[in-house]
Amino acid sequence: MSTVTSLFRKSLAGSTLALSLLTASVQAQTINLSYNGAPDADKNAVHVFATNLKSLVEEKTGGELELKLYPNSMLGEEQERMEQVISSPSLNIASFAGMAPIVPEVYVSATPFMFEDFAAARRFFDEGDYWKQVQALFSERANGAEILAVVEEGGFLAFTNNTRPITQPADFTGLRFRAMDPSQVALYEAFGASGTPIPWTEVYMALRTGVADGQMNPPMYILLGSLQEVQKYLTLANIQYSDQFLLANGELLKSLSDDERTALTEAVKEANAQAREDNQNQVESRITSLEEQGMEVIRPSKADIDAFRTKGQPAYLQWLKGQDIAPELIEMAMKDAGVSA
């Protein structure tokens, strides 16, 4: 072998090694993001947020961080996914059912009839002292994991059932409702109905077979679960602001560079703003779609809403006080929302 050939091969080998090292140094860090619901932008506001976040994170980090989306609870139900985000470098969008075992204080934010509109609910979470306290408590109890955002999931909750139109509290008497968690059970009982916690994945069959007469969810989730096929009546009572929570593993956040953490924070804020706008713009069209598919839509009067609030809110607040939640935190939340506890 000639000296020139030998030098060329050594040079080529060195260049290949350098290229391999460079490629390894810029290889994307893949982060799992899990959440409920189908990967359908028309029906799932959480998926809209997740896809927006994926694009923005990858754009802002120049591809150094890459999100891999796992919709439809592919990585497990609420509690399994919560355990994953606490123990492994991942992201998760959790519902109240996932959050409450760690921070039951989150139930305070679900006090029924607390917000008049989207603007009031967003101020409560974006600016309120109560929510800052919940974020701190969660991080303290979840091994440094953090709540990065409150994610809208389709508007305000509405009541549905397959028995009779609901226009006032007395219409609930004797009905059986699917509940997402114990807080919803407390609300149904205040109205004279009963509530049974049933996982989201089992709701359609429970309603179809009569295990439950009704449930409450925003119009988006009614469409997502095809509940209009097994529910006749839709009562737009603006019960609760419908939201979930973007969580990040503590060790994952510590592993990010300052630039990566800034990029993630900015991406979360922008994705949330985009998803909120998209969500609010679709509320009425979703209601129209449900009506066109055969649901009878009931729009309670202000007097009817006041009756729901008068009956349901005190009972719910009384339930909260039995959940070992600091009374001052409840008072703080009510103050942030402009409601007297």
Image: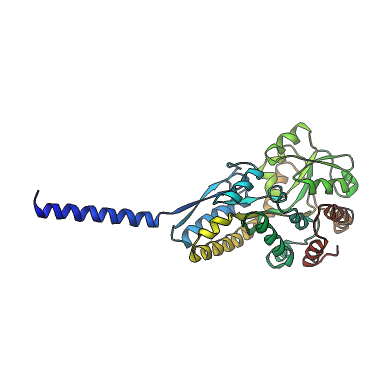
Q: Camera-side residue: 23 or 227?
A: 23
- Where residue 186 appears, as percent x and y from the top left, is 84, 48
- Residue beneath the point at 50% across and 56% down: 55
Front-most of residues 246 and 272: 246
Q: How is the image coloured?
A: rainbow
Quarter of the rendering containing residue 108: bottom right
Tell me the quadrant of the picture where the C terminus can be found.
Answer: bottom right
Q: Position of residue 10 (x, y in %)?
A: 19, 53
How many numbered discs?
A: 0
Whether residue 75 is visible, yes or no, is yes
Residue furthest to the top: 209
Residue at left 70%, top 59%?
137
Of 297 and 216, the residue lying toward us: 216
Q: Residue at x 59, y 60 (%)?
A: 274
The answer to whether residue 52 is seen in the rendering is no
Q: Position of residue 50 (x, y in %)?
A: 57, 53
Going by the image, does 103 lie left or right of 3?
right
Judged left or right of residue 81, residue 339 is right
Q: Is residue 158 above or below residue 209?
A: below
Q: Residue at x 77, y 50 (%)?
A: 158
Image coordinates for residue 304, horizontal then vertical, percent: 87, 55
Q: Nearer the viewer, residue 17 or 93?
A: 17
Asked whether, in this view, residue 93 is left or right of residue 164, the answer is: left
